[in-house]
Image (spheres, helix red, strand yellow):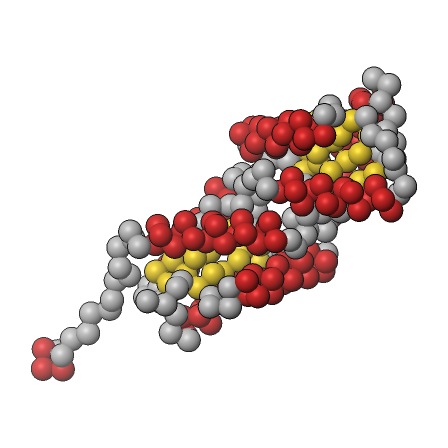
Amino acid sequence: MTAPALVILAHGSRDPRSAATVHALVKCLRDLRDDLRIEASFLDHCPPTPYQVIGKLAAEGVEEVVVLPLLLSSAYHARIDVPAVVDEARTRFPDLRIIASDVLGYDESLLDVLDRRMRAELKDGRVRELDALVLACAGSSDSQANASVTRLARLWGQRHKLPVTAAFTCAASPSPAEAVLQWRLEGRRHVAVGSLFLAPGVLPDRAESTARRAGAVAVSRPLGVSAEVARLVLLRYGVAGLDLLTLAPAPRPTVLRPELVRTA
C-alpha cells in the first residue's frame, strides 16, 4: 500500500522569507522520508494553493492525501480555514481520500529549538547575563490557544530558573514590548525575548523591533527549519494517516453499461 501524500498547508505571507522557510522545511522532510510524496501549499499571499497541489497529485494517480496545517495554534485558521479547504478539496476531487492532521501545537520539543536560537543571539550580542524572559508569539482571540503559550512559557522559565511572561503581537495582551517594559519596571534590566514563530515575517519583525525599543537585550530568530519541527510534522502526519484508514472509501462514479442507457 502506498503511503498517503503529505501536503503542507502554510498560512502564507507577502514576506518571501516565509515561503522560503516552508520550502526549506519540505526539503528537510523529503531528506528524512524519501519514500513519501511531500508538497508545500499556502492559504494566502503566495502560490501554490492547496487545490493546485492536490489537483496535481490527483492527476498523477495519488489516492490518499494528508493535509498538514503548518500552524502552532488551534485557533481561527485551524478551526475555520483548514476544514474549509479540506471540504472544498473533497468536493473538487471526489476520488481522493483526504484528511487534515492536527496542527503542530505548542509542543515542548520546540523549546530545544528556541534555546538554540536564543544561545546564538546571546553569543552574537555578547550578552552574558539574563534576569527575565519573554516568550513572544502571534496571539489569538482564542483564550485556550493563548493559555497553551502561557503553559509553554512556564516550562521555558523552569528550564532556566528565570521568571517568564508570555506575550502576543496581536489579539491579546501583553505585547512583547509591554512585557519587557513590565520586567524593567520591576528592576530586571537583562530581559531576552524568545520568538515562538515558525518563520520570519511581519509579526516576528514587529515583535523584535518593539521589544528592542522597550529595552530587550536579545531577541531570538524564529524557529525556522529544524529536526524537531520536522519530527513534529511527521508525527502529526503519522497519526492522521492512521485516522485515514477509518474514513469511508471515496465514492466512485456510477458508470452505466451502454445497453442500459435509454435513447429517445
- Judge by depth and name the residue closer to the eye, 260 or 45: 45
Task: Name the image quarter holding the C terminus.
Answer: bottom left
Going 51% across and 45% down the picture, which residue do you hit? 103
- Residue 15 position within the rendered picture, expressed as x and y whole percent measured from the top left: 72, 56
Residue 130 sits in quarter: top right
Q: Is residue 193 above or below residue 48?
A: above
- The answer to whether residue 40 of the structure is visible from this angle is no
Residue 135 in the image: x percent, y percent? 70, 34
Left or right of 218 on screen, residue 83: left
Number of marks in the image?
A: 0
In the figure, residue 115 lies in which quadrant? top right
For residue 165, side relative to residue 86 (left or right): right
Q: Which residue corresponds to the image point at 26% horizontal and 55% vertical from the top-left?
A: 248
- Determine the residue located farthest toward the right in the rendered image: 126
Q: Residue at x 9, y 82 (%)?
A: 259
Horizontal side of residue 19 vs 216, given as left or right: left
From the viewer's perspective, is 58 left or right of 137?
A: left
x, y percent for residue 9: 53, 56
Instruction: Give the farthest residue toward the top.
Output: 186
Q: Residue at x 35, y 50 (%)?
A: 243
- What x and y, as percent, mark residue 219? 80, 40
Image quadrant holding the N terminus, namely bottom left
Q: Is residue 182 above or below residue 121?
A: above
- The answer to whether residue 65 shows anywhere in this view is yes
Depth check, front residue: 95 or 243: 243
175 shown above or below 232: above
